[in-house]
Image (cartoon, coloured by chain):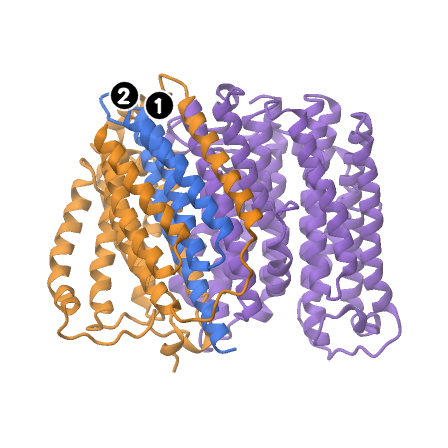
Chain colours: A orange, B purple, C blue
Amino acid sequence: MIADLLIVAAIVALALPVVLARSAFTAVALFVAYGLLLAFAWVRLDAVDVALTEAAIGAGLSGVLLLGAARRLAGGPPVEDAPPGKAQVALIGVGCAGLAVALGAVILALPDPAPSLAEPVMANIAAIEVGNPVTAVLMGFRGLDTLLEAAVLVLAVVALWALAPDAAWGAAPGWRQPPATDGPLALLARVLPPIGVVVAVHILWVGADAPGGKFQAAAILAAMWLLPWMAGIAAPPPISRAWLRIVIAAGPVAFILAGFAGSVLQGAFLAYPPGYAKAVIIAVEVVLTASIAVALALLVLGPPAEDRGA
Amino acid sequence: MSAGMLPVLAVMLPVLGMVLALPLGARGAERLTLALAPLGLAVAVAIAVVVYGGSAPIRHELGHWAPPLGLAFRVDGLSAAMMVTAAVVIGATALFARGQFGTAAGEAETRRAFAFWPLLLAIWGATNLALAANDLFTFYVALELLTFAAMPMVALDGKRETLEAALRYLMFALLGSVLYLLGVALMYGAAGTLDVVVLASRAGGTYPVLLAAALMTAGLLAKTALLPLHLWLPPAHAGAPAAASAVLSALVVKGSFVILLRLWFGVLPGIPGPMAAQILAGLGAAAILLGSVAALAQERLKLLVAYSTVAQIGYLFLMFPLIASMPGTETAAKAWTGGVVQAVAHAFAKAAMFLTVGLMAARLGHDRIRDIAGAGRALPVPMITFGLAGLTLMGVPPSGGFAAKWLLLAAAIEAGQWWWALVILCGGLLTGGYVYRVLSVGLRAGEATAPTRSADGQGIALVLAIVSVLLGFLPLGAFGLVQIGRLDLGP
Amino acid sequence: MSATIFGLLGAALVGIGLFGLLVRRDALLRILAFNLLGGGVFLVFGAVARRGAGAGLPADPVPQAIILTGIVVAFAATTLAVALVLRLAAAKDRG
C-alpha cells in the first residue's frame, strides 16, 4: 500500500515535468526514468509479463530511440507554430483535468465483483497445452490478434522505410555512427550481446509456462543486435538485403500458414491439432521472435538517412 | 470448404500479400497485388452471394473458440457490400497505379514502388478486417493497420508539404487510436468481454459504459474526419499521389465509420440516446454545408475534391438520429440502407474523381481550376468521368448517390426531422455548384493542351464513375443485402 | 487495493498526456505526451486485469495479453512519428 503510493507519487512527479519541460532532451531523460518506474507498477499489478515488456520496450528501446532523436533535433530550427494563449491553455487544462477526474470516478464505479475471463481461460488452457495463461491467450484464444499485430510490425517497417529520402534508398538504415573502438560503449557492445542472447533465449523458452515470451525475448535480442551498431563497431545490413527482408516476413508468414493448416485439418483458422498445440505454438513463436527482434531493431534505427546517400 | 473460410480468406489474402511484398521487392509485390485483386474480388462476391442467398450473416469462430473467450468473424450484409466495394476499388487502383508505381523487368527498385504495393494491400486487409471482425480490440488492430498504411501513402512523394500533412494526420490518428483503446479498457472492465454480439446483451447504460462509448466515439470521429476533426484531411488527401488519394478517401475513412456503426447500433443499441445522435448528425450537417462551401472556394482541383470528401462524410452521420429515434421501424431500415449506400456510392465516385483529377494534373502539368479551360477538348474522357462522379456526389437521379440521398431524405421526413431533409437538399445544390464550376471552366474553349498518352488509366477511372452511377439502377430488392444481420435488430 | 491506486494513476496520466499533446507545439514533446497518454491507458487496462483476478490467477490474463501487444504497437507508432519528425527537420534544414 505505502509502496504503491510511493511509486504513484514518483511516476506523477516524473510525468508532469515531461510535458512541462523546456528542452526535449530533459523531457526524454525524465521519460526514460518514468518508463522504468512504470515497470515497477506492473510488478505491483501482478503483471510480470507486462513489466518485462515495459522495461525492455517502454524504457529501453524507446529510450534509445528518443534520446537519439533529441540529439538530432537539438539546435535545429525553432518551432514555427505559435504556442496557444494563456486562456486556451487554462481551458485545455481544465478539460484534461475533468477527463482525468471522470475517468477516476468511473474506475471507482466499475462493477464488483469484476467480470473476468480468468475462469474460462483456466478451464480451457489444457487444450492450448501451455502453462502461462497470457501465452495461452496470445497464441490460442486470441491468436488472431497476435498474428495481426505481428503483421502490423512488418507494415511498420515498410512504412518507416517509405519515409527514407530517395537518395538513400537501399542503403543501411539509420545514421552513420562515429566508431567508438575503446569507449565504455564499445566494451559493452562486445561483452553484453552474448549474455543478452542467452537471457533472451531463456525468456522465450520459459515463456510457454512462466512469465516471459516472444515479445520480451525479441526486445532484448533487438537491443543486443543494436549495441554494436550504436557503438560504431559494426554496420547494420542495407535494407535491400534479401535475407533481412525474409527474416522480417518469416514470422507472420509462419503464423498465417499455421492458421490455414488449422482451417484444412481442424476446420477453423488457427485451430491447433490436439496433442500438437504446444509444438506448433513453440515453432511459430521461435520464428516470430526472430522476426519481431529484427523488426524492432530496424524500427529503432529508422530509415536510411541522408548521410547514407551515395 | 465451409462458408466460414470466406471471411478468413478476405482478410488473410491481402495481409499475407502485404507481408510477402517485403521479401518479393517492388516488382514482385506489384505482380502479386495484381494477381490477388481478382482473387479477392471473387472471395468478396462469393461472400455477398452466400449472405444474400442465406439471408444470414456468415460466422466463423477462430480456432473453434467461441466468444467471449475467443474471437469470431461475423460478416453481415453491410460487410459483404463494403467488401465487394473495397475489392473493386483496390483492383481498379492497382491497375491504375501500374503507370506511376510499376517496375519494369530488370529495373532497380525505387522507394515509391517498394512502399506503394504493400501499403495498398495493407489498406485492403485492414478494411476487410474492420468489416469481418466482431471484437472491439480486433477493431483496434484494424485501425492501427489503416493508420500505419495510410500515413506513408500521404507522404509518398517525399515533399516537405506532404511530410507535414502526414505528421498532422499521424497525430490525429494516434490520438484517435489511444482514446478508442481507453474506451475498450473501460468496456472490458464493465462487461468482461469485447465481443460485439455478447456486449449487446451485457453492456447496460452504466457510467463506465457511457464514458467508454464517448471516448471510442471521439476517437473514431477523429479518424473518420467528421467536422470539426477534419483539419488533417484536405492537405493529406490532396497531397498524396492520385492512386493513394483514391483509396484514402474511398476506403480508409470508411473503416473507422463502420466500427462506429458497430459500436452505436451493435454494442449499444438505444443507449447513447436520441440527443447524442442529434449531435452527431448536427456535426454531419455542418460538414456537408461547410465542406461544400470550402470546396466551392478552392483554387486547386485536388483540394476541391478533398473538401468534397469532408462534405460527403457528413451525409454518413444523418442516419444516426433517424435510426435512434425510430428503432426497429421501416424508417430506421431506410435510413440504414441510405447511409450504407452513401458509403458505397461515395467510395466509387470519389475513387474515380481522385484518379481522374490526378490524371488531369499529370497531363496538364497543373491543377489550377481557372486554367483548365480547353480541357474538355484535350481531355474528354477525364472530364466525362468527373461529371459522372459529380452526379453521384450531388445525388442526381439516376445514380447511386441519388438512391442514398433519397432514402435518407424519405427517412428524415417520415421521422418528422425535416431539418435533415433541408440539409440534404442544400448539400446537393452546393455540390452541384462545385462540380459545375469545374465543368464550366473545363468545357470553355481555351488554351489547355495535353500530350496524348496511351494507357494512363483514364478508362479505369471512367469505369469506377460509371459503377457509381449504375448503383442507382439496381432494383430496390438488391439493397436488401445491407439489411441482413443488422445488429440493432438483435443477433 | 493496488488495482484502484494504479487505475487512478492511469487516469491521471491520461489527463497529463492529453494536456501535453494538446498544448505543446514541439513535435518530440508531443510524441512523449502521446506515450504518457498511452501508458495511462495501459495502466487503466492493467487495473481492470487486476480486478479480474480469479481461478487461482492474480489477474485476468486476457487484458494482460492485450496490453502486451498494445505496448509493442504503440512503440511502433512512436518510431514512425519520430522518423517523420526527423525527416521533416532534415527537409527544413535544406530549406
Q: Chain of mark 2?
A: C
Farthest residue in the top direction? A113
Q: Is residue B465 visible?
A: yes
Q: CA distance from mark 2 to mark 1?
A: 8 Å
The N terminus of chain A lies in quadrant: top left
Residue drawn at point x = 63 percent, y = 40 percent: B81
Q: Quadrant of residue A282?
A: top left
Q: Quadrant of residue B43?
A: top right
Q: Amino acid at mark 2?
A: Gly
Q: Is residue A291 visible?
A: no
Residues at circles 2 and 1 in contact by the CB criterion of under 8 Å? yes
Instruction: Give the residue pinned by disc 1.
Output: A116
Q: Chain of mark 1?
A: A
Q: Nearer the viewer, residue A169 or B116?
A: A169
Residue drawn at point x = 86 percent, y = 76 percent: B446
Tally of marks: 2
Instruction: Give the structural element (helix, strand or loop) at label 2.
Output: loop
Relative image position of residue C47 (x, y in whole percent) = 34, 30
Q: Nearer the viewer, residue A262 or B468?
A: B468
Residue B31, relative to residue A215: is it above or below? below
Q: Few, some or many C-alpha atoms within 10 Å of disc 2 (few <14, some 14-19, many ≥20)?
A: some
Relative image position of residue B376 (x, y in whole percent) = 83, 70
Relative image position of residue B175 (x, y in whole percent) = 49, 46
Relative image position of residue B215 (x, y in whole percent) = 52, 35
Instruction: Give the residue pinned by disc 2.
Output: C54
Residue drawn at point x = 27 percent, y = 73 percent: A177
Q: Few, some or many C-alpha atoms within 10 Å of disc 1 (few <14, some 14-19, many ≥20)?
A: many
